[in-house]
Amino acid sequence: MHAIVPDTFQGAVIVSIIDFFLSFLIISGIGVVLALFPLLNRVAAFLNGHTPGHGTHGRQKDAANAKSAHEDPLLPVAVISAAVTAMLDGAPNRVVSIMPVQGTAWVNEARMRQYGSHRLRR
Amino acid sequence: MLEQTLNFLQALLDQTGAVNFSLGNLLMIMIGCVMIYLAIAKHYEPLLLIGIGFSCIVANVPGPADVPGGPAMSALLYAVRDGGLFHYAYMGVEKLIIPPLIFLGVGAMTDFGPMIANPKLVILGAGAHLGIFVALLLAKLMGFTLSEAGAIGIIGGADGPMAIFVAVKLAPHLLGAISVAAYSYMALMPMIQPPVMRLLTTKAERQIGMGEIRKVTKLERIVFPLVIAVVVNLFFPPVAPLITMLMLGNLIKEVGVTQRLAKTAAGGLMNVIIIILTVAIGSTMAADKFLTVQTLEIVGLGLVAFLFGTGSGVLTAKIMNLFLKTKINPLIGSAGIASVPIAARVSHVVAHEENPKNLLIYHAMGPNLAGVFGTAISGGILLALLGAG
């Protein structure tokens, strides 16, 4: 082992200062590289847009998916009814109406359940 | 007749471990029990603490003297010594086989999306590593060599495999104490961090909410491990084995065509490694080896490193707030200490207690993941400067 710095307290201070500030610098560099990542999407979108037929094909696929989801409007009703019945332990129930949720309430609730269970000592 | 019977009984007793039982063993068994209690009752990283705690308990139940007049050795230590099953487990740690495999598994189970989505938060991954250098300087003042001090300091990076990696390179004789300190404190972070976080923030700061962050595309997720692997191999060869494996694990997760490999790396393989690692670490906690002044000094310095790392992360976030239009919750600063995802979860839970509508987990994962790179960078620079690169 050939240490660059002397094995003294002064050496320890030098190592600490160099390491701490270089870490900041390099991590910042990684941050800058990551900040450029959205450009990748633009490049990809540009390339996709110029690939003959690709954009049209993608739109056709989306339309097909949307169509299949709307083909059976009773499917979500069946899934939601099954979930409600399971939650109520099979007790008699009736789903009166179903509407899409605006916002992220369900996601937030799930996260709260998942992460709120940890108890911390004050 | 009576004398002969007593002699037989004495001979029988001598073949048990009871005669070699010491107060130190009792203390370490109690520590092992506390670890298991925290894992079961408080859910503090049970995957780590169950194995370490159990091994700690068994390693402190002395067996009969190995040879006449020789040291008492527990059943576990029999398994750990040359030729025993866990001897090879410990060799995996010592020969740096296990740390890269852990990173492979971590990569395969980690979503780097939060870090890619919010690049400005990666700075917290460096800010939360002041503890490394505080511990390093204190260790030097306490009489450790600079290499030993560097290995002890890296405990403050709160990254177990990295702590093992740097310790093996800089101070292999301290590997046992350093790995025990690193993993024990990582598991106990839900107890260590919150008081420091609350001390350094106001109630209003802890209640700062953070909005949604942008969605990261699959293309970005695939390019990320490739770019980082190249950058790390180019600029940080000393720690490249670990980060390269981390990125390989992440790539096989993100490409979407190697689910079998990703599932194995993040599941079965990782579980096997965790069992081996925790037993290997816990088995080094025998009282005669662990209850020494040097080990206790290292454990104490590890705690100092964690406390200062947590504090510096929070303060870095507060400094960033001075320059940011949209304020960030400073509690996510402490997540920059690495220890994925424990530190991020602590940030989330503390913020959630202050404001039940505050869900910081996704935001805290950004600095948390950056902390892995921060520790790797600090470790890499230490290895290079101290001549072990």
Image: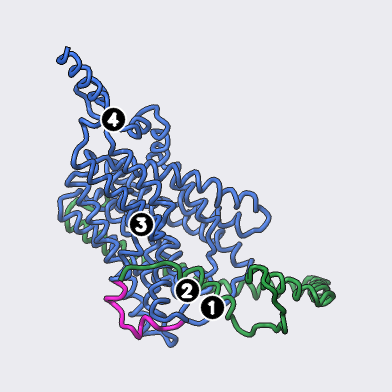
Chain colours: A green, B blue
Residue highlighted by disc 2: B363
Q: Residues within 10 Å of mark 1 (few under 14, many from 20)?
A: few
Q: Is residue B229 left or right of residue B52?
A: right
Q: Amino acid at mark 1?
A: Ile
What whole-number distance in Å separates the C-alpha atoms at marks 1 and 2? 8 Å
- Above-or-below relation of A46 to B300: below
Sequence-first tag of 1 and 4:
4
Which of the 4 quarters of the picture holds residue A62? bottom right
The chain holding disc 4 is B
Q: Residues within 10 Å of mark 2 (few under 14, many from 20)?
A: many
Q: Position of residue B220 (x, y in %)?
A: 60, 67
* Label of residue B63 in the image: 4
Specify the quadrant that holds the N terminus of chain B.
Answer: top left
Q: What segment is highlighted magenta in the picture?
A: B196-209
What whole-number distance in Å separates the C-alpha atoms at marks 3 and 2? 27 Å
Mark 1 vs mark 4, foreground winner is 4
The chain holding disc 1 is B
Residue highlighted by disc 3: B38
Q: Amino acid at mark 3?
A: Leu
Q: What's the residue at 19%, 23% (across, down)?
A: B69
Q: Position of residue B207 (x, y in %)?
A: 39, 83
The chain holding disc 2 is B
Sequence-first tag of 3 and 2:
3
Residue B200 magenta-highlighted: yes
Sequence-first tag of 1 and 2:
1
Sequence-first tag of 1 and 3:
3
Residue B48 magenta-highlighted: no
Q: Amino acid at mark 2?
A: His
Q: Secondary structure under badge 1?
A: loop
Q: Are marks 1 and 4 in contact (CB under 8 Å)?
A: no
What whole-number distance in Å separates the C-alpha atoms at marks 1 and 4? 57 Å
